[in-house]
Amino acid sequence: MASFPSIAVTATLKLHPQFRKYPPTSFTVEKSQSISLQKGHLDPSGYLNFREELKEGTEELESSFYVPLLQECLDKCSISDTNIVHGHVMKTGTHEDVFVMTFLVNVYAKCKSMEDARRAFDNMPRRNVVAWTTLMGGYVHNSQPKHAIHVFQEMLHAGSYPSIYTLAIALNACTSLQSFKLGDQFHAYIIKYHVDFDTSVGNALCGLYSKCGRLELALKAFRRIKEKNVISWTSAISACGDNGEAMTGLGIFLEMLFEYIQPNEFTFTSVLGQCCEIQSLELGTQVHSLCTKFGHESNLRIRNSLLYLYLKCGCIGEAQVLFNRMDDMSLVSWNAMISGHAQMMELTKDNLSACRSGYEALNIFSELNRSGMKPDLFTFSSVLSACSRMVALEQGEQIHAQIIKTGFLSDVVVGTSLINMYNKCGIIERATKAFLEMSTRTMISWTSMITGFALHGKSQQALHLFEDMRLVGVRPNQITFVGVLSACSCAGMVSEALNYFEIMQKEYKIKPVMDHYACLVDMFVRLGRLEEALNLIKKMHYEPSEFIWSNLIAGCRSHGNLELGYYAAEQLLSLKPKDSETYVLLLNMYHSAGRFEDVSRVRKIMKEEKIGKLKDWSWISIKDKVYSFQTNDKAYPQSSLLCKSLEDLLAKAKNLGYEMLECMEISDEEEEEKTSSPTIYHSEKLAITFALENLPNSSPIRVVKSTLMCTDCHNFIKYVSTLTGREIIVKDSKRLHKFVHGQCSCGNFGGFL
């Protein structure tokens, strides 16, 4: 509704003189009210047989006769029974009674039959403000706010004065419509008659301004309320949370406690959400204690909010304990745990921890299926995210089949999650199929597919798809351009990359972030144009990240520019990195150049920074079972046979020209003299050898590795893919490597250790 009718702002309008007597939809019969019922007209067992009772006669009845009957219809939410009572009301002439007819309108509205409610209202010979307000409230309750505004207009034209409750419902209608302009006109009317101090009106105003994103006005309306109730305080707190001002909301919550107002379940839910937003575990646990004190801990809404709080703050153990104690879990509870574990995968420092969280997410998803509760689109999106991170194709395919069965395949969120899952699992063809089958594509869908093509080294397809995206009018964002620049980097398309970098800034007004510069640096490094890479780094508006310096160091080693490599190494050390991989990269560079003083210096820094030994794990999934391997792993039951098979494979690779390299490792203190080690028993080599012996000949091999691959392993796997004709996919801590016929999707440059 664009504007408020002119009649609503004229000076002749008034409030109903006894507006406080008329709450909108409250029809409770007082205990003291006399209910005179004729003998034989009601069944004493609870009015269960009122259909027969209504047939007994049409003699004149008191209006109170219909109150319990209508209440029973409301309790059962039975429109058919309400229709019978309605017919009897009309037959006996009781439709002249405003109270009964208003109650009837209320029952129809609560039973979600607004057509019947409107028909009953139109049959009323007389209407008071309660009747008008009840009909308006029904329309708002049934998500028809425009009709509520039209009824308000009719009421004004009929010469009836609105009550405070009428105005509150009208404001709620404006909120549902998100019509700030119309709400302003109602607010002006409210101020004119000096009722903005009223609790109901103030609460409604607070909700309206919050929904329209005007927090300052929402809090101003809240402050003007003279008698604030728990709804008032909760509205103000929620308004802060909805508008990104969690700290202000928590401050108002403290005010509420100081005023000795007892919070309800909605207050606690909002407050816990805001603790979650600022990730304040300390404050959240105090709120948890208050929930227990006021007897709300068993409330499902609050338990779900607590789950999200603990998960968001990384307290997965506390969340699991709370989840296990829940007797009446909702789908929200299950989704919280699944998405929480999926989120933990992104927060962990290594792929090994991520894998553990991922399998926990899959286990919870299996429990959900066994519980009989049906997953929704949020469930599928979260669990597919876990499969993506784990490169768990088999599980992802099973979930895809379940999605088709449950009818969620057409959902754009689920479709995009499928694209991501197949991309991350190295199946670009299936990802493309999922993308083409989408009936609706969002910017995120396009970006996911562009990034997928770039990830698989299909640069031309990525750029063509980006141009299609622009052609259909979908506006790219920062992440889209990361995918575009990454595609240019893989193919060494310098002029195209610089052109897109300029388009991003000038045409789309997107300010470059670190990832954009990292793509350009990677491109120059791949091409051996190291000085240009360094010049770009110096022109950046940000302090270069560890990833950028590490990438430059890898390029310097690959292209033999050691002096620049030493400079980059000093810049990297100045950032005081905490990642073991970074130090292994530096150790390898200094050791291969014979700079043993620098090797000792790096080791000293590692000791001071308490950098632990590099944990090199690889694992594969075969028929829903996970097999993990560690470098030089002798604990595996068939380790001797596995090592023998690996040695045979190594000999065959050498016949094709493979040469083994040595790699530095971070030693334990008592092994300080040890500086390098052979790479034959690295974890990914063991995992691939095991897969070759336990998977069908045509099956691709998918390995997840906790750290970066070393140069030797990368070279070795290229030869293995040629020898066996297998497609081998290795996801290390930085990249996805897809080996086919001796070539890798990373373009044989992956920033290796």
Image (cartoon, rainbow, N blue to C red):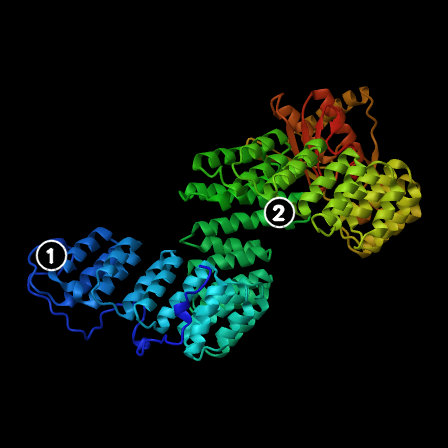
Left or right placement of residue 431 versus residue 678 in this view: left
Badge number at residue 345: 2
Residue 64 place in picture, x, y as percent? 16, 67
Amino acid of disc 1: Leu
What is the crowding at mark 2: few (fewer than 14 residues within 10 Å), some, or many (at least 20)?
A: many
Per the image, label 2 sits on a secondary structure element best described as: helix
Q: Which residue is mark 1?
A: 54
Badge number at residue 101: none
Nearer the N terminus, badge 1 or badge 2? 1
Please tell me which residue lies in front, 557 or 611.
Answer: 557
Q: Is residue 582 visible?
A: yes
Residue 97 place in picture, x, y as percent? 18, 67
Q: Is residue 268 visible?
A: no
Please tell me which residue lies in front, 137 or 38.
Answer: 137
Amino acid of disc 2: Met
Per the image, label 1 sits on a secondary structure element best described as: helix
Q: Nearer the viewer, mark 1 or mark 2?
A: 1
Residue 541 place in picture, x, y as percent? 80, 55
Residue 577 place in picture, x, y as percent? 78, 53
